[in-house]
Image (tube, rainbow, N blue to C red):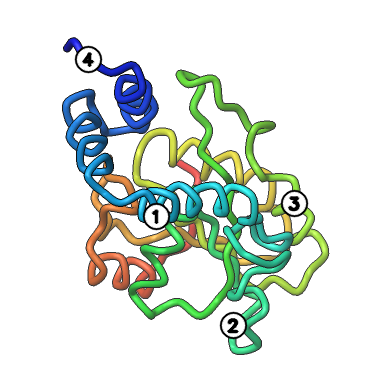
Amino acid sequence: MKIPSKHIENAVEQLSSLPGIGKRTALRLVLQILKRSEEEVHDFSNAFISMKANVLKCNECGNVSDTPVCSICTNTSRDKSMICVVEDIRDILAIESTESYLGVYHVLGGIISPMEGVGPNDLNITSLVNKVSKGGISEVIFALSATMEGDTTNFYLYKKIGGFETKVTTLSRGVSVGSELQYADEITLSRSLQNRQLFQVY
């Protein structure tokens, strides 16, 4: 695709570097942005610059936040003795949309995937082990995607925290095997949380 403007071509390259956006879609978006006023484009770009400069990771759980500790961790009505372990913030959003979980979270920042070069040391695992080892945690829920990588990560985490006096559970298989948590519908996800089961090593 030959683009007659180097500036448009550069913008297309940047947009198409995002996952799920091909060159044609990127071009359509760029041409739409080009139609906007200079003020609108300024606000558009500033939103991303501000996001990158100001969004923090929660010191407690790893969730995204505008403050050092996120609104979930500072919420006094949440059960701090119950930790739901998730892959990333999209899973938190999915679970929160069910309005059926009142504990807190721990964001791993990914799952163990040798094929993609992601090992345990690349994930936020040590802080989870430290939380459990200090006591006061009644339950850890593994809410990772029902995939081979998710199950591998569950097994690794269980080996790390299974020796402590903490109940370890996993989502019921209302979430189908091979699916990613963030794509589960709210009812299925809610029931999976409510009917969670003790984690078992096979």
Of label 3 and label 4, which has the lower sequence position? 4
- Report the amino acid beneath label 3: Ser
Is the residue 152 above or below the residue 3 in the image?
below
- Report the amino acid beneath label 2: Arg
Which residue is disc 3 drawn over? 127
Of label 2 and label 4, which has the lower sequence position? 4
Which residue is disc 1 drawn over? 39
Where is residue 98 shown, x and y percent of the image? 33, 74
Disc 4 secondary structure class? loop
Of label 2 and label 1, which has the lower sequence position? 1
What residue is at 21 percent from the left and 36 percent from the top?
A: 31
What residue is at 24 percent from the left and 31 percent from the top?
A: 26
User: Image check: 33 left or right of 68?
Assistant: left
Q: Nearer the viewer, residue 63 or 196?
A: 63
User: How packed is label 1: few (under 14 Cα within 10 Å), some, or many (20 or more)?
Assistant: few
User: How packed is label 4: few (under 14 Cα within 10 Å), some, or many (20 or more)?
Assistant: few
Disc 2 secondary structure class? loop
Rounded to the nearest angstrom, the CA distance separating label 1 from label 4 is 25 Å
Rounded to the nearest angstrom, the CA distance separating label 3 from label 4 is 52 Å
Q: Nearer the viewer, residue 20 or 141?
A: 20
Q: Quadrant of residue 165?
A: bottom right
Which residue is disc 4 drawn over? 4
What residue is at 57 percent from the left and 53 percent from the top?
A: 50
Residue found at the far top of this picture: 2
Q: Are marks 3 and 2 in contact (CB under 8 Å)?
A: no
Rounded to the nearest angstrom, the CA distance separating label 3 from label 2 is 20 Å
Rounded to the nearest angstrom, the CA distance separating label 2 from label 4 is 56 Å
Of label 1 and label 3, which has the lower sequence position? 1
Which residue is disc 2 drawn over? 78
